[in-house]
Image: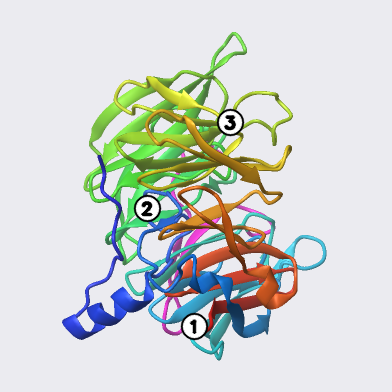
Amino acid sequence: MVKPRRCARVVVAVVASALLLTGCDWAQLGFGPAGTSYDPIEPALTETSVAHLAADWSVECACWPSRPLVAMGTVYAVDGYAGEAPFPLTLRAFDATNGTPRWSVPLGTSRPGDVLAAVANGLVYLSLRPTSGSDQLVALDAATGKTRWQVVPPAPGSGPVVLGLPIVDGAQVFVSATASDASQVSAFDALGQRVWSVVPGGRVFEGSNLATVPGQTLYVATGLALSNGQGLSLLKGYAVSDGAARSAALIPDPTPVQSIAAANGLVYGTWFTAFGRLGSVGGFAVHPDTGALAWSGGLFEQAVAPDAVLTNNPRDATLEARDPMTGAVKWTTFQTGSGAEVAGALVVSSEGDIRRLSDGVRVGAVRDAVNEDLIRTTPANGRIFAVAATHLYAVSPQP
C-alpha cells in the first residue's frame, strides 16, 4: 500500500513546527504527482473550525476553469477567462496571507485548455495552447514570472501537437504529447532538457493526466483503435528515473480513460462517458500489473484518500464515498458540483460545502463566507482558496 505523501518540502525544525500548525502547499492540480486530490495535513481545518469561516482577502480574477495553486506563501492563478475564446491570459501571483499582488505576466492569446499545472523546483509549469500551431510546455521563474524555458514535446505523428496535463515528480516534469492520434510521453529536467521519452502505443485522451507512485512508477493510460472499429484501453507503467518499462496491462473496457490516480497499490480512474450521456459507469480501480478490475462505480472520481475514494454523478447530484479496495459505498449525499478535494479529515466540494470524510455530514460552507456561488476550491495551509465567476477568495477559520 502506498502511504499518503506528506508535504513535499525540506524544512528546518522551526519551519517544520509551523508547518504542522498550518498545513500543506497545494502545488499541483491533483495535489501531488499521484493525482489523488488528497491533502493529508490540514490541522487548522477541522469540523469545528470550519463552522466559522470568513474571507481574509479577495481579488478580481476571471480564474475559472484554472485551479489556483499554492506554494511557499504564494498563490498562483491564471486570469482572463472572460468573454468568448480565444482568451488573453495572464499568470498572476499573490501573497497567500493578504492577497497583495507580487507579479503578473501575460501568457498570450490562447484557445481553451491552458493548464496551470504545478509549482516546483523554483518554477511554475504550464501547458499553453496558442491560437494556432502546437501546444507548449512552459516553465516560468516562480519568484518573478520570467520565462526560464519553453518546449514543444515530441510526438510520433505529424501536425500540431496537443499536450496532456503535466505532472511534476521530484526534479522532473512529465507530459504526454499527441499528434495524428499517436502519443509520446517525455520527462524533462528543471532546465528543460529532455531526460527520456517513450511511445506507449495508442493515444492519450485529450485533457487526461499521467500519475506516479512518487519516485517509482509513472502510469499512462492510452486508447488504441482497432481495424474493426473497436478499441482497447491500455495501462502502462514506466520507471520515473529512466522510462524503463515496468508493467503493461489491458483495462477491461474499450472506453477511453479520462483521468487516473495512483494509490493503495491500485490505479483509479474515470472512463470517458460524455458526462454520463453514454450510459456507462465512469469510475473504476484496476490492478496495474494485470489490468484486473478491482471495482467500478459512480460517474467521476474526484479524490483518493487512504480510507475513502470520492465519486460523484452530477447528473443526479450525488457524491459518494467508497471503500478504496472494494468500491463498496460508505455514504451518499447531495452535491450539485462536479468536483471535490480531501483536506485532512474533511471533504471540500467545488461549490463550497465542507463535509466530514468519515460520514459525509455537512460541517461548514465556504460560500457562506463570501456570499457568492463558487466554482472551484483549493484547500492549503489552513485556508481554502475559492474561485467564483469574477473573484479569487482566501477563506480561513475564525475564532
Q: Which mark is residue 282?
A: 3
User: Which contiguous range is marked in magenta?
Assistant: 130-158
For this orientation, the residue located farthest to the top is 228
Regarding residue 146, the answer to whether it shows in the image is no
- Identified at 57% across, 45% down, the residue is 207
Left or right placement of residue 342 versus residue 77 in this view: left
- The nearer-to-camera label among 1 and 2 is 1
Asked which secondary structure carries label 1, the reply is loop
**Mark closer to the chain start, 3 or 1:** 1
Q: Are marks 1 and 2 in contact (CB under 8 Å)?
A: no
Measure the alpha-carbon separation of dots 1 and 2. 23 Å
Find disc 1 in the rendering and name its residue. 96
Amino acid carrying mark 3 in the image: Gly
Relative to 55, does residue 251 appear above or below in the rendering? above
Identify the residue position indicated by label 2 in the image.
33
**Disc marking residue 57:** none
Of residue 287 and residue 367, the one placed in the foreground of this image is 367
Work out whether mark 2 precedes mark 3 in sequence or the reverse, and give the earlier one: 2
Q: Quadrant of residue 362?
A: bottom right
> What distance separates the C-alpha of mark 2 from that of mark 3?
22 Å
State left or right for residue 393 relative to residue 240: right
Q: Residue at x 55, y 91 (%)?
A: 100
Amino acid carrying mark 2 in the image: Pro
Amino acid under label 1? Answer: Ala
